[in-house]
Amino acid sequence: MTFPKSSGRDCVRAWEAMPWVLQNSATQEESEWLEGHLAHCESCRTEFAQQRRLQLAMSLPTDVSIDANTGLKRLLNRLDAPDIQEAPRRSRSGNWLNRALVAVVLIQALSIGALGVKLWSSSGTPTYRTLSQEAAPSAPGAIRVVPDTAMTMADWNALLHTLRLQVVGGPNDVGAYTVAPAGPASTTPHALQQLRATRGIRLAEPITATP
Amino acid sequence: MACAEAMNQDDIDADVTDRMLLQRMSTGDRAALNVLYRGYHGRLARFLSRLTRRPDIIDEVINDCFWIAWQKAGNFHGDSRVSTWLMGIAYRCGLKALRQHGDEPVENTDLLEQLTPDDDMDEDRELRDWLSKGLDHLSADQRVVIELVYGVGHTLDDVAVIMQCPVGTVKARLFHARVKLRNVLPALAGDSPKQKENAP
């Protein structure tokens, strides 16, 4: 049963007027009109009686028993300590969200910091060199030596020992070693001469600085 | 009709008194808070009982409502009646409380036993049961509108202010609530011989 569709225009008007007539907020004219309509419309009379019963039921005091005195006492206690009580109340909602946001920002800041430190430290020692840059300084009196592949390790070591040389670099891609005098007693020209005279040494050239 | 605000003299007098109490509350007068609290406690408890049947939540919401009223008493500009303003605060606090712990189980079963007062007259109890069965078929917002219109006697404009929605929305909620009750309540009344006698 759905109301207004099956009823006449007056019944719709009566239906709309009922709550306001019941709560005395309708105009005098509207109240009198409704009274006249109810006098000859049984359907609306039944509806109005039910509306009156509904209003009566709604005006009964609540069946939920709550002590006003206890509630008021708690309220006054709450007013006495607003800062202590309200701070946690406010922070309760969205607490986890705030913490998560702070954690994300913190992680982001730490990551940016770590990246910055890494970039700063690596920028001091580049892994490449341009042709315009000076070559890395080599040890004083260094000689580039290419031993024959047939030369044994024992012969190589014995030769270096005899000439008081030590390996300071290499071998590189073509098998060249960089050797330098092990002490002040050894001189480069002498060592260079000896190396070139040694069988099994294919190349011995002094390394000079920038040409 | 309903939209044309027609406050009777009693309503006007009550509102003047309420405004004076709010004014005193804004200066820290706790005696005024006491009077306003006691004056509205029963009305708010019944209003909130249409939202939830849990006494502990209703108690908490009334507490929150008056705590806000105490804090904001000085900001009340009189755009509406004090009763409308308070009901609006209670409604929003009620919805918030339901969102927070409306689905929690009731720990104290004694609370539920408080629902039916022992001193209820048979006639009132029968009427209460009849209403309760009807309201069970309505949504929370429909129950609130029915309470505000039939229980408290607010106009459509007042209800729109309280629920912070357009008057058209209130009209629609009231219409659907009434249609549902119209369909359900006669059947419930059929169980009661007394009701049959009263029907024309």
Image (cartoon, coloured by chain):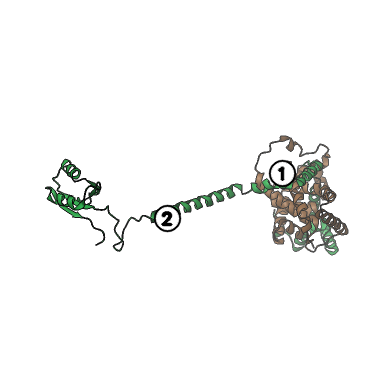
Chain colours: A green, B brown
Q: Residue furthest front?
A: A185
Q: Nearer the viewer, residue B106 or A138?
A: A138
Q: Which mark is residue A107?
A: none
Residue A43 seen from this side: no
- On residue B57, the disc is 1
Observer-nearest of B41 and A127: A127
Residue B120 visible within the image = yes
Quadrant location of the C terminus of chain A in the rendered image:
bottom left
Q: Label 2 neighbourhood size at 10 Å, few (<14), some (14-19), many (20+)? A: few
Same-chain status of marks 1 and 2? no
Q: Quick check: A96 left or right of A162?
A: right
- When asked about the image quadrant of residue B167, the answer is bottom right
Secondary structure category for the residue under label 2: helix
Left or right, residue B12 beside residue A151: right
Graded by Cα atoms within 10 Å as few (under 14), some (14 to 19) or many (20 or more), the crowding at tag 1 reads some
* Residue type, mark 1 in image: Ile
Image location of residue A2, percent across then percent down: 69, 55
Q: Exactly how many numbered labels are in the figure?
A: 2
Left or right: A98 in relation to A195 = right
Q: What residue did someone put label 2 on?
A: A120
Residue pictured at 29% horizontal, 55% vertical:
A137
Mark 1 or 2, closer to the camera: 2
Q: Secondary structure at mark 1?
A: helix
Gap in angstroms between the C-alphas marked 1 and 2: 60 Å
Which of the 4 image quarters holds residue B170? bottom right
- Amino acid found under the numbered disc labelled 2: Trp
Tag 2, which chain?
A: A
Q: Position of residue B156 (x, y in %)?
A: 76, 59
